[in-house]
Image: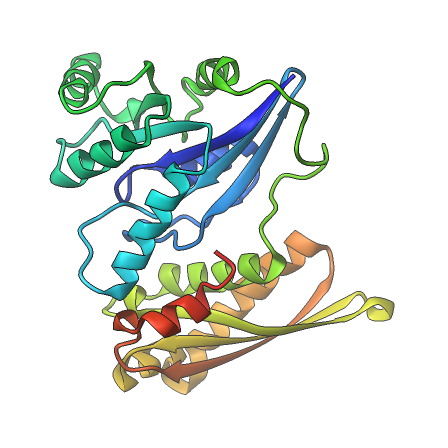
């Protein structure tokens, strides 16, 4: 039996969260076309007869412009130093960037085994995959590589077969029925934020943070009451999130409530308040409070 932690790292929008969800068969991490969707370190647990694989999804490694960006990058670097194996994800359909170069340097400094995972295999020709592999091999040494498509499932079983032998020997670290160890308040906050991202296409997405204040349970009624605050940086953004006659926040709340009810199998009462916190992305103390569970 083998078990261990595997970091899933890469620049924004390379498909880290999509891969995590595809491998676990569950929605562990929210997915959006917008960069820097992932802000927590989220773990998905795979149970195989011969191994338990704990995949750690991380924020996209990028050129930071504010305290939030610095914090997210620190989460990536911290994860790299805490795991047994690193999956370095690179989008095979795009050119190598400075972000890829800097992340490769961080991985090299860790002295940990690394597998190169070229994503979005379904979107490119074999020649492009070969070119991407050769380009990455010039900036980092990796033990092995594979091209995958999380959306079609191509290469996923082979990826697992390459991960397992590289994990340390040892018993499983989590119960066999557990697919994530993320706290429920984190899951709830991320689901709410996902609905904001998916419904609003203007200046708001990067300026949105969600804080779950408290959760109250009524076992007799199979009811969960969730009280959360949605933070934006400007009054104009608050108006967008609320929408005309409260239409947008109602839509966001309904979508989040429905998914939370599906997730928990319980009725959900969801209270959402939209607040303005000017320039919160530049305030380290606020960032650490919001992402205290990360």
Q: Position of residue 22 (x, y in %)?
A: 49, 32
Color style of the picture: rainbow
Left or right, residue 234 beside residue 171: left
Query: Which of these two is toward me, 232 or 77?
Result: 77
Instruction: Please tell me which residue lies in front, 166 or 93.
Output: 166
Q: Nearer the viewer, residue 146 or 171?
A: 171
- Rendered image quadrant of residue 199: bottom left
| Above-or-below relation of 231 to 199 | below
Residue 220 seen in this snapshot: yes
How many tags in the picture? 0
- What residue is shown at x 41% (from left), y 67% (from top)? 288
Where is residue 188? Give x, y as percent.
56, 61
Residue drawn where x is 23% and y is 37% of the image: 103
Q: Is residue 129 left or right of residue 165?
A: left
| 149 sits left or right of 201 in the view | right
User: Where is residue 57, by image quadrant?
Assistant: top left
Q: Quadrant of the N terminus?
A: top right
Vertical order, 4 against 277 (above or below): above
Q: Is residue 36 visible?
A: no
Quadrant location of residue 47? top right
**Residue most extreme to the right:** 220
- Above or below residue 2? Residue 98 is below
Q: Residue at horizontal 60%, vertical 18%?
A: 169
Location of residue 31 in the rendering, given as x and y in whole percent from the top left corner? 41, 48
């Amino acid at each position: 039996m083998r078990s261990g932690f595997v970091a899933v790292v890469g620049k924004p929008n390379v498909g880290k969260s999509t891969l995590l969800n595809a491998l676990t068969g569950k929605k562990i991490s929210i997915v959006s076309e917008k960069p820097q969707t992932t802000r927590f370190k989220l773990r998905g647990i795979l149970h195989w007869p011969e191994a338990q694989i704990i995949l750690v999804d991380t924020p996209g490694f990028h050129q930071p412009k504010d305290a939030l960006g610095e914090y997210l990058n620190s989460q990536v670097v911290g994860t790299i130093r805490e795991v047994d194996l690193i999956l370095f994800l690179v989008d095979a359909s795009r050119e190598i960037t400075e972000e890829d170069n800097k992340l490769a340097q961080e991985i090299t400094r860790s002295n940990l085994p690394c597998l190169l995972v070229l994503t979005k295999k379904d979107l490119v020709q074999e020649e492009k995959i070969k070119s991407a592999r050769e380009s990455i091999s010039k900036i980092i040494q990796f033990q092995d590589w594979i091209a995958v498509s999380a959306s079609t499932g191509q290469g996923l079983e082979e990826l697992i077969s390459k991960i397992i032998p590289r994990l340390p020997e040892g018993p499983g670290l989590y119960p066999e029925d557990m697919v994530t160890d993320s706290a429920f308040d984190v899951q709830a906050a991320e689901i709410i934020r996902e609905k904001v991202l998916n419904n609003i296409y203007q200046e708001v997405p990067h300026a949105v943070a969600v804080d779950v204040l408290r959760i109250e349970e009524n076992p007799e009624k199979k009811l969960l009451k969730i009280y959360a605050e949605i933070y934006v940086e400007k009054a104009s953004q608050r108006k967008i999130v609320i929408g005309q006659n409260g239409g947008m926040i109602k839509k966001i709340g309904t979508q989040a409530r429905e998914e939370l009810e599906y997730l928990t199998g319980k009725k959900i009462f969801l209270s959402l308040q939209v607040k303005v916190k000017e320039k919160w992305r530049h305030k380290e103390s606020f960032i650490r409070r919001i992402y205290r569970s990360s």
